[in-house]
Image (spheres, rainbow, N blue to C red):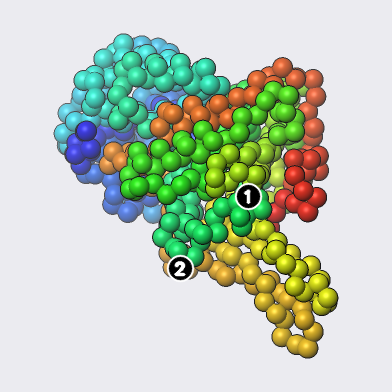
Amino acid sequence: MNDQLTEFPCSFVIFGATGNLASKKLIPALCRLEEAERLPDGMQFIAIGRREWDDDGWKDHMRSLLREKLQDRFNETVCERFAARFSYLRGELHELDMYQRLGAELSRPRSGVCSNVIFYLSIKPTDFPSVIKNLDKSGLSRPRGLHRVVVEKPFGEDIESAQALNRLLHEHFDEQQIFRIDHYLGKDTVQNLLVFRFANTLIEPLWNRNFIDHIQITAAETMGIENRADYYDKAGALRDMLQNHLMQLLTVVAMEPPPVFDADALRDEKVKVLRSVRPISMRSVNAHSFRAQYAAGSIDGMSVPGYQAEPGVEPKSITETFVAAKFYIDNWRWRGVPFYLRTGKRLKEAKSMVAIRLRHPPQQLFRSTPLEVVSPNWIILSIQPEDCMRMEVHVKQPGLEMNTRVISLNASYRREDEMPLDAYETLLLDVVHGDRTLFIRFDEVEWAWRVVDPIVKSWAVERDFIHTYAAGTWGPLEANRLFDDEDQDWRNYL
Ligand code: BG6
């Protein structure tokens, strides 16, 4: 619809500009796009925050955060060019007056012709409704169909609130204007997974229940909740990571090839996967999911406090910082193959990957040799810290004995001189260009909520106990109870 308009300069309004996400991801990614000369000339940014700053105060803050985040890549000239695009607006999200001042700021004549506006909601989900209503009351959502609104995850806190939020958005914006972001979809390995699966004849024939024993999807972090207790203590790992990032990875791993490579065809296939996930009955929530919370421990040799001692966390909070869950996809391709999903904060290593374990060969041909039982093959798709793909195969060790070793067929696609992109760089540029392929359609959000809903509901009432794990470990051993077979175990290494 309004895709051509974005070639003209646009204004980019960041709600929550002083928050954790804006500082860690958004502002550095936008600055790298400035460096790559990918921001349209005349594009202006308005940062909204509660701190008592003027434009210069904001710019000083931004310079120091960019210096810290970009380190060796920090470039003074680029930073100044980028800072010159910014103005700062102080205000409270629920005060109409702030939106009126924003309106005045947006209509101030500048060098470019700012025809449309991107509103980026880098704020707590509980603040979304207030911002959307105030955009409308102050006339900033009009003319209808023109501007874009980017909504960060989690979209709602359960299925009902997600539906209510969606209805509210649709009262003021058309679907083409709404960009529901899940930055995992902007990660290179995730996009490469589609190429790996659908551009190679070698892979696709193996990608099903006949050859695959189970699939593990892990997003492990060493960091704690930083200064986000206000949000995290209400969300927990299930809402913060599993319902969105991990579910999105699951859909990309499990989907059928779409008829064409476009936003809707791709999203149709992802929705089909979510609709095929076997519903978990309330009675079987414990057999399918596991939660835990970090206790004090040490990360890289440094002592760190437990979750309940983090500033802002409710005393005796039972919010989960670790979640593991098992899902089955009841379709022809995947019936019977368990998908184990796991994420946690303050774990031993920061590592996100999809690990696919293939079945044992049907015949144990080497039973009478020193080799005896051959361990199964794995395909590893690592998202971070390295983005790489590898397939493990057995080969004979040179020598007189019949012994094997495992070698990796390395399908890494990045050369050493090729800089990795941050997911936000890709996605922010897509917003500017109006490309929604890597953004989430509401039915995906809704079905992902449906999948986890029994877990959400059951954990909401079972509030008297949570397992703990020492910070710096891989989480409690009790999580292993999810495995269907004794020979299944978490794969923690690349
Ligand atoms: C965010 C979560 O969406 O993703 C954070 O809110 C989490 O809690 C982050 O730390 C992880 O992102 P990445 O790209 O560092 O894996």
Q: Quadrant of residue 395?
A: bottom right
- State whether residue 379 is above or below residue 22: below
Q: Which residue is mark 1?
A: 215
Percent x, y for residue 301?
76, 51
- State whether residue 489 is above or below residue 377: above
Element at label 1: strand
Calculate the distance from the C-alpha at mark 2 to the C-alpha at mark 1: 28 Å
Percent x, y for residue 136?
31, 14
- State whether residue 329 is above or below residue 358: above
Q: Which residue is mark 2?
A: 415
Q: Front-most of 344 and 203?
A: 203
10 Å neighbourhood of mark 1: few (<14), some, or many (≥20)? many
Q: Front-most of 148 and 238?
A: 238
Q: Quadrant of the N terminus?
A: top left
What residue is at 31 percent from the left and 11 percent from the top? 137
Task: Tell me the number on the disc at residue 492.
Answer: none
Q: Quadrant of the C terminus?
A: bottom right
Q: Quadrant of residue 287?
A: top right
What residue is at 72 percent from the left and 67 percent from the top? 363
Q: Front-most of 8 and 59?
A: 8
Element at label 2: loop
Q: Is residue 321 visible?
A: yes
Label 2 close to label 1 by CB (< 8 Å): no
Give, as a three-letter code, the residue at label 1. Answer: Ile
What residue is at 58 percent from the left and 40 percent from the top? 329
In the rendered view, does 299 fall on the left or right side of 198?
A: right
Q: Nearer the viewer, mark 2 or mark 1?
A: 1
In the rendered view, does 166 fall on the left or right side of 299?
A: left
Q: Earlier in the sequence, mark 2 or mark 1?
A: 1
